[in-house]
Image: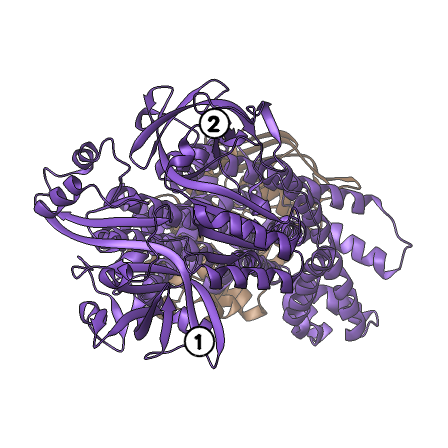
Chain colours: A purple, B brown
């Protein structure tokens, strides 16, 4: 067996001698796809491993226990301190103000008050270098804080400047470069400010009902006995929630997984487009090797032997291309380690992971064989009699049952690998189906276009008729060019339509529906005065306020939430504290989906109104019972109605609104929004409120939208750049096709020149030929792009479609221009060939 | 060739009413229109005729390279006309050595590798000893590691002759082997071919335009318009 293989391999290598150059396009195609998959796999593997290694540092301990509004019960606090190492943290949002040359500047910040034990694990990096313990606290009557660099830039403040938090004046003692336990805090409303817990007390910011988070980071003395279940038992019946390193890292890992799935899919699409390049490259190679194959057949070689020789050669080329692709892929984390260190981890030491190497190898191998097998079957149709006369049978009807089975097996392995890569059966099913449907659509539409083109007749002798014939002739590669470019262009058009629709949606929301500002942490005794001020500043109906407190769902229909199975999309509702409101009056603009609102004078058992989609995701209906834990007390409420929640309007949207059943006596705060009545009026109102009430913070919706849009823009740029790689593989396919068809084009230019055509005239003919091929590709992509984005936006995103026709037009011209310029540049040298020399040497 | 040798017992190839029709999109050309022929062991047969008469097609049918439209072909009394492609390949590798007018060597292989190729294709390990012996016999002992493009036309044809003999075939088929060579090289190649035919005890079927070369054969067959006329 080994000897047989060796014999075949030696013969294949000997036959391959001097032909390596013919495979450069095949090699480039394999390289690009495999490189992306291995690079993405390596980066995500490294990130996950790094998170796994540093998860204690990132959470700040083995466990993070937290409560809202109230401090920890003493028994829990004492137990934790006795059984391990702890650090106590208080977090809240407030306005920081800075008086710059009698101009008061304000900014909402995230305060984090820490004790002397902070951090339990890792280090806070401060500029200039100092220890966190020594950089905070009161010294010489000066209270010291540390601030984020972003706050320094936004307010133009620096070290040694004085700022105000609540009633207290603080001196900036340093800039926070890195906070070890901050990586998992995705949603933040403002820059971080670190201060000592003692100094927080004097600010007057801690008020009953204010949204304050108390946290204890905990490293147990005995890690074997003190686990999550144990601690859950310990805090049972309180409003303490616990995050462990496991469930925290899961979220981050999911994020990394989802991102790498997307990029890997682009890699896979690139690889599939490369497949078209591989297929054409091999087809061209086999055509060039026709004589050799005929010679070997005349010497007694069987078809299987020939197939074996050339398959071996492809595999040799595959190995040659895949080794540098994988090597470069696995070294990407090393190239990016300075950025990853700076953005995510203090120190990042990349490693090489086996799984991405194996996955990219298998993807590459299967794609390579899958797209090679049909062109290789061309060898079956080559007859030895070709040595004395041309008799090749181009029908390529050798797809035997054995080959069909091999193709089905390979496609199945590819599907299994993709499902394994995505690790979500439902999602991978949709993705595979979409990929297959898109490919079939692209293939079908391309063939339809060429069929129509083959039926059209232009006036004989015109350049259009000449070009039409060149494109539709039986051995033309035009279809392959169209297919390979259409995949990438369709992707770009789909992304563009989704982007413009999302952008439009946000813009409409900002301009028409969304409030101007949010005011948070309003104390109950302050609300009436604020309402009156709003009336004089903003007029009637332009101020909306609701009471708010936080709590957790513990049971639904007497079943603990830990035992409930709900849709993945709504799991977040049950995971942590949620904000509640209450009202006997139906809030303005409420659209009830089922049930009715309770009477305004209602004072019976607690009722709840719930967001309709959330109710459906949790299989809840009217009459079902939900038990909440609010400030350590347990309340049960019956669902009375469900209502529509439109998150995009950015207004006050509570999932749960309770009836007024004495719950209003619990310590709480108010939240309010102002409608946009003109920037100056809104700003002066907000300015008046926050200068009068130092505990109230304001959030500008416009600024929030700006940051959302900038994140969205960045995401779109990244996605589009990756999608552009698919066009690059289209160019590689085109380069291969031009190489394969070079001999035909040389012949064509020689004959045309003999018949009197100038190089300019020939170039013009080619320009038309390639531009029309590009246009066909654009039309196919536009149809696919419009169709897929319509389905996605209508049925999945539920967003109204908005077309940015200018951009779509630019994208549609991109491919014809790219194809024409690249082809003409590559074939320019052919135009200068001498016809007689060409005919003598080549034909 | 004596009449004793020409008895049925020595019959190597028999062609019965062979027709070859070549179809194109416009027309069907009847290249061979009913050839009947017997070729005996160890004999040399010269086939002559005008261009397009069907000479090459006839020998390609014998080599199993051309598929016939009608008729029967027997090799050692065994039918080969109904063999499948792979069986025909096996038949060629075991029994036939072909020499083409345009040499048809693989450009990526040295003279030695080209000579060894039929053995390797048949699934055996290369036989360098025999290949060198054959290359020595054709006068190319010093050129064994040269590639085809480093050899003259005459030298390339000698390599092709050596290659055709490596499997020790029963039949040597030569399709105008001197067609691409000058006079001196043609004479040398023909001399060599007949000498090796004698040494190896093969049957030689030679297509040529040159009647003086054909006359060196035991028998001459003339083809005209797809039929044997003499």
Secondary structure at badge 2 equals: strand
Mark earlier in primary sequence (2, 1)? 1
| Relative side of A244 to A506, left or right | left
B91 or A520, which lies in front? A520
Q: Which residue is located at x 41 percent, y 53 percent?
A: A187
Note whether B182 is above or below A413 in the view shown: below
- Quick check: can you spot residue B167? no
Q: Position of residue A412 (x, y in %)?
A: 44, 34
Note whether A612 is above or below A682 in the view shown: above
Estimate the spatial distance between the alpha carbons at disc 2 and disc 1, rounded to whole Å. Answer: 46 Å
Chain of the residue on which disc 1 is drawn = A
Q: Which residue carries the number 2 mark?
A: A608
Q: Which residue is located at x 36 percent, y 52 percent?
A: A41
A367 or A295, which lies in front? A367
Note whether A128 is above or below A763 in the view shown: below
Disc 1 crowd, CA 10 A, few/some/many (<14, 14-19, 20+)? some
Q: Which residue is located at x 85 percent, y 61 percent?
A: A463
Camera-near label (2 vs 1) is: 1
Q: Which residue carries the number 1 mark?
A: A99
Check the image and name the residue furthest to the top.
A623
| Relative side of A751 to A135, left or right | right
A680 or A310, which lies in front? A680
Q: Quadrant of residue B64?
A: top right
Note whether A286 is above or below A24 in the view shown: above
Secondary structure at badge 1 equals: strand
Question: Do marks 2 and 1 both belong to one polypeptide chain?
Answer: yes
Chain of the residue on which disc 2 is drawn = A
């Amino acid at each position: 067996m080994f000897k047989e293989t060796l014999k075949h391999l030696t013969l294949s290598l000997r036959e391959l001698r001097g032909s390596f150059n013919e495979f450069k396009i095949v090699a480039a195609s394999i390289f690009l796809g495999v490189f992306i998959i291995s690079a993405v796999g390596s980066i995500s593997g490294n990130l996950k491993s790094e998170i796994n290694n540093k998860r204690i540092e990132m959470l700040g301990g083995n466990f993070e226990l937290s409560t809202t509004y109230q401090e920890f019960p003493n028994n829990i606090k004492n137990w934790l301190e006795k059984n391990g190492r702890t650090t106590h943290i208080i977090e809240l949002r407030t306005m920081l103000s800075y008086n710059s040359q009698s101009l008061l500047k304000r900014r909402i910040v995230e305060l984090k008050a820490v004790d002397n034990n902070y951090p339990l694990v890792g280090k806070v990096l401060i500029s200039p270098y100092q220890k966190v313990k020594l950089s905070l606290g009161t010294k010489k009557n000066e209270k010291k804080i540390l601030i984020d660099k972003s706050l320094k830039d936004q307010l133009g403040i620096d070290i040694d400047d004085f700022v105000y938090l609540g009633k207290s004046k603080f001196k900036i003692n340093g800039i926070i470069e890195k906070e070890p336990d901050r990586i998992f805090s995705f949603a933040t409303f403002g820059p971080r400010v670190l201060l000592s817990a003692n100094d927080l007390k004097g600010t007057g910011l801690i008020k009953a009902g204010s949204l304050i988070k108390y946290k204890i980071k905990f490293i147990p003395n005995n890690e074997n006995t003190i686990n999550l279940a144990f601690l859950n038992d310990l805090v049972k019946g309180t409003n303490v929630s616990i995050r462990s390193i496991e469930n925290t890292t899961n979220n981050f890992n999911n994020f990394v997984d989802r991102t790498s799935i997307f990029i890997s899919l682009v890699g896979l699409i690139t690889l599939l487009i490369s497949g078209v390049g591989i297929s054409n490259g091999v087809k061209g190679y086999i055509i060039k090797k026709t004589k050799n194959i005929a010679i070997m057949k005349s010497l007694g070689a069987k078809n299987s032997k020939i197939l074996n020789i050339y398959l071996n050669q492809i595999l040799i080329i595959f190995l040659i291309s895949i080794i540098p692709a994988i090597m470069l892929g696995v070294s990407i984390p090393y190239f990016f380690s300075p950025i990853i260190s700076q953005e995510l981890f203090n120190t990042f030491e990349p490693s090489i992971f086996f799984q991405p190497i194996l996955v990219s190898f298998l993807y590459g191998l299967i794609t390579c064989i899958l797209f090679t097998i049909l062109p290789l079957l061309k060898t079956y149709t080559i007859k030895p009699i070709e040595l004395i006369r041309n008799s090749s049978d181009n029908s390529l009807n050798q797809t035997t049952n054995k080959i069909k089975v091999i193709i089905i097996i390979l496609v199945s392995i590819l599907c299994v690998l993709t499902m394994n890569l995505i690790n979500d059966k439902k999602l991978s099913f949709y993705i595979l189906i979409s990929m297959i449907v898109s490919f079939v659509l692209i293939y079908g539409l391309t063939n339809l276009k060429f069929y129509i083109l083959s039926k059209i007749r232009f006036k004989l002798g015109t350049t259009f008729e000449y070009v039409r014939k060149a494109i539709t002739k039986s051995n033309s590669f035009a279809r392959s060019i169209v297919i390979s470019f259409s995949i990438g262009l369709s992707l770009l058009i789909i992304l563009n339509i989704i982007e413009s629709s999302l952008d439009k949606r946000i813009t409409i929301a900002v301009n028409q529906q969304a409030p101007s500002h949010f005011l948070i942490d309003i104390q109950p005794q302050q609300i009436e005065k604020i309402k009156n001020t709003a009336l004089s500043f903003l007029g009637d109906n332009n101020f909306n306020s609701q009471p708010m407190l936080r709590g957790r769902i513990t049971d639904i229909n007497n079943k603990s939430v830990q035992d409930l199975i709900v849709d993945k999309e709504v799991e977040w509702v049950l995971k942590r504290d949620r904000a509640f409101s209450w009202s006997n009056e139906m809030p303005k603009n409420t659209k009830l989906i089922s049930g009715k609102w309770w009477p305004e004078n209602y004072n019976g058992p607690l009722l709840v109104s719930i967001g309709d989609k959330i109710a459906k995701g949790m299989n809840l209906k009217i009459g079902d019972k939900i038990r909440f834990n609010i400030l350590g007390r347990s309340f049960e409420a019956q669902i009375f109605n469900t209502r529509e929640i439109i998150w995009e309007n950015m207004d006050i949207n509570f999932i749960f609104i309770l009836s007024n059943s004495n719950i209003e006596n619990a310590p709480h705060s108010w939240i309010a929004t102002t409608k946009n009545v003109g920037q100056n009026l809104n700003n002066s109102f907000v300015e008046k409120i926050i200068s009068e009430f130092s505990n109230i913070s304001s959030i500008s919706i416009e600024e929030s939208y700006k940051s959302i849009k900038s994140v969205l823009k960045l995401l779109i740029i990244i996605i589009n750049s990756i999608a552009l790689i698919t066009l690059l593989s289209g160019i590689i396919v085109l380069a291969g096709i031009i190489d394969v068809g070079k001999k035909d084009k040389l012949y064509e230019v020689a004959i045309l020149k003999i018949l009197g055509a100038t190089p300019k005239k020939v170039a013009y003919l080619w320009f038309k030929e390639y531009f029309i091929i590009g246009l066909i590709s654009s039309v196919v992509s536009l149809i696919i792009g419009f169709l897929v984005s319509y389905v996605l936006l209508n049925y999945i995103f539920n967003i109204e479609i908005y077309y940015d026709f200018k951009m779509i037009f630019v994208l549609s011209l991109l491919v014809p221009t790219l194809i024409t310029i690249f082809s003409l540049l590559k074939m320019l040298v052919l135009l200068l060939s001498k016809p007689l020399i060409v005919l003598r040497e080549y034909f | 060739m004596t009449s004793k040798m020409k008895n049925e017992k020595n019959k190597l190839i028999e062609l019965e009413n062979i027709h070859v029709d070549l179809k194109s999109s416009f027309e069907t050309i009847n290249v061979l229109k009913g050839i009947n022929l017997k070729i005996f062991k160890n004999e040399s047969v010269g086939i002559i005729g005008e261009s397009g008469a069907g000479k090459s097609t006839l020998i390609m049918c014998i080599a199993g390279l051309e598929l016939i439209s009608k008729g029967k072909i027997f090799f050692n009394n065994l039918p080969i006309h109904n063999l499948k492609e792979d069986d025909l390949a096996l038949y060629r590798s075991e029994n036939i050595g072909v020499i083409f007018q345009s040499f048809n060597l693989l450009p990526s292989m040295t003279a030695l590798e080209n000579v060894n190729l039929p053995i390797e294709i048949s699934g055996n390990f290369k036989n360098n000893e025999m290949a060198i012996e054959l290359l020595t016999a054709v006068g190319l002992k010093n050129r064994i590691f040269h590639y085809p493009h480093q050899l003259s036309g005459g030298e390339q044809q000698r390599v092709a002759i050596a290659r055709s003999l490596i499997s020790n075939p029963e039949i040597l088929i030569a399709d105008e082997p001197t067609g691409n060579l000058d006079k001196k090289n043609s004479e040398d190649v023909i001399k060599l071919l007949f000498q090796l035919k004698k040494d190896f005890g093969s049957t030689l079927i030679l297509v040529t335009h040159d009647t003086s070369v054909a006359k060196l054969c035991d028998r001459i067959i003339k083809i005209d318009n797809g039929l044997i006329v003499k």
